[in-house]
Structures are given as structure tokens and as C-alpha cells.
Image (cartoon, coloured by chain):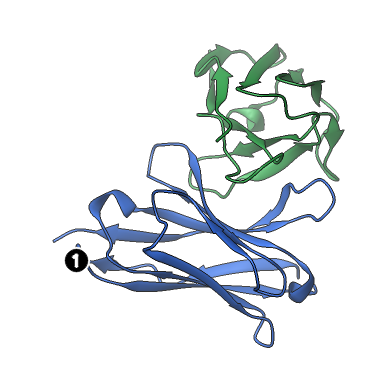
Chain colours: A blue, B green
Amino acid sequence: EVQLVESGGALVQPGGSLRLSCAASGFTFSTYWMHWVRQVPGKGLVWVSRIKSDGNITNYAESVKGRFTSSRDNTKNTLYLQMNSLRAEDTAVYYCAREEGGDRYFDLWGRGTLVTVSS
Amino acid sequence: DIQMTQSPSSLSASVGDRVTITCRTSQTISSNLNWYQQRPGKAPKLLIYAASNLQSGVPSRFSGSGSGTDFSLTITGLQPEDFATYYCQQSYSTPRTFGQGTKVEIK
């Protein structure tokens, strides 16, 4: 089955760190750009980061630049998001999404994992 | 960054109605505009890509149009399962910005 499954969400204190994972299956993971998108409960979708198929290019939203790092292990078909110096405003459901190469739309999404930053 | 302005932010409609949601971008993006549906507690789902292309498996009552800076999503013959929140997104440049969403509610 073609799917993405996120994990790693948790309750963490402000200033803490967390690493999210996104396990891909059913498709050739190593050929796709991948993205992270987050959503504060009850609010809209916000793009967070992207990573090239080979991992050599990454881009980030200004709100997370310098604190979050996206990486991937194509041998394990897994995408990661390392989140450091977490703030209350990082509280959200984090989705990973696959980008279709031509028109660059997100055609496959995971179910999301909840990150809560609170003392 | 490209700003996305969706309207309305919410609407009430009845089963069978025709509904149109609009999305305006702060700069021209050709046809690099996608529409997603999100039901409560679920992940977003791609409906329309490249402004007017129906994603495989999506019912034909959904359609998209537009280019440049003005786009629209139309649902012709609203069904009970269509009550959800809809988002536009530009794929012209990074960051890949989303509209603020349009919640379609039952009248």
C-alpha cells in the first residue's frame, strides 16, 4: 500500500527538542521531494520545509529556519524533522507529504503526528 | 513570499447546491495552483492540481479554473461528504503557501 506514516510527536517543554519520522512505503521514496506541513488544531495549513529526493537541498519557512532540520534516509525510506529550541507556537499536527515532480502538488499525505510544546 | 487570499472563509450550503470558492495570489503563478479538501481529524486530500486537473479518483462534480492570479474551485451538486474545509496552495515557488481555508458547512 502506498502510504506515509508519521511518528514521534509528543509533549515537550519549551526549549526542548524532538525528532519526527515519516515512514514511506509502496513507492520509490528516493525519487521524490518530500515536505513537512503543520497545522495548529482548528487553524489552517502551514508549509514548514522541503527536502530534495537525494537530500542535498533543503528549504525552510522563516519561522523555523535555524531551529528545524529536515533529513532523509533513502535506505530506510524515512523522512525526518529534527526540531530544536521548540516554542509554544510550534504546537501543531505535523504532516509529511510527497511532491509529485511535474506540477509539484502534494499527492500523498500522512495522517499527522501531534507535537505539543508546553511546560 | 506569495500571499494567498481565499474567499469566503466559510459558507453554508445545502445538498445539491453549486458552490464556488475563490483564491487570489499576490503575484502571477501561471497555473501552479492546487486545491485540497480536509475533513475533520483527517489529512488533506488533493482534489485539483495545476488549476484545472482533476486528481485521479476525485468525483467529477469538483472542477477548478483560473490562471495568473485568480482561481476558483467549484462543486456542482454538493454531497454530504463534501462538507469539509478547502485549501488552495501555490506550487510556483517556495515557500509553498496555502490559503487560509474555506469551511463548507451544512445549511
- In front here: B75 or A95? A95
Task: Determine which quarter of the picture holds residue A79.
Answer: bottom right
**Is B31 positioned to the left or the right of A95 in the image?**
right
Could you say where residue A35 lies in the image, as x and y percent from the top left? 60, 58
- In front here: A116 or A75? A75
At x 84% / y 36%, what residue is drawn?
A: B54
* Residue A115 is at least partly visible in this image: yes
**Is B62 positioned to the left or the right of A87 in the image?**
right
Could you say where residue B68 lies in the image, as x and y percent from the top left? 76, 21
Task: Determine which quarter of the picture holds residue A54.
Answer: bottom right
Could you say where residue B12 lies in the image, as x and y percent from the top left? 54, 13
Numbered marks: total: 1
Residue beneath disc 1: A13
Vertical placement of B38 versus A3: above or below? above
Residue at the extreme bottom of the image, as rendered: A75
At x 30% / y 72%, what residue is drawn?
A: A17
**Is B46 positioned to the left or the right of A50 in the image?**
right
Vertical placement of B28 versus A3: above or below? above
Could you say where residue A115 lies in the image, as x and y percent from the top left? 35, 61
**Which chain letter matches label 1?**
A
At x 76% / y 49%, what residue is drawn?
A: A104
Task: Determine which quarter of the picture holds residue A96.
Answer: bottom right
At x 57% / y 36%, what residue is drawn?
A: B98
User: 10 Å neighbourhood of mark 1: few (<14), some, or many (≥20)?
Assistant: some
**Is B73 positioned to the left or the right of A88 in the image?**
right
- In front here: B24 or A93? B24
Q: Quadrant of the C terminus of chain A?
A: bottom left
Vertical placement of A12 versus B51: above or below? below
Q: Amino acid at mark 1?
A: Gln
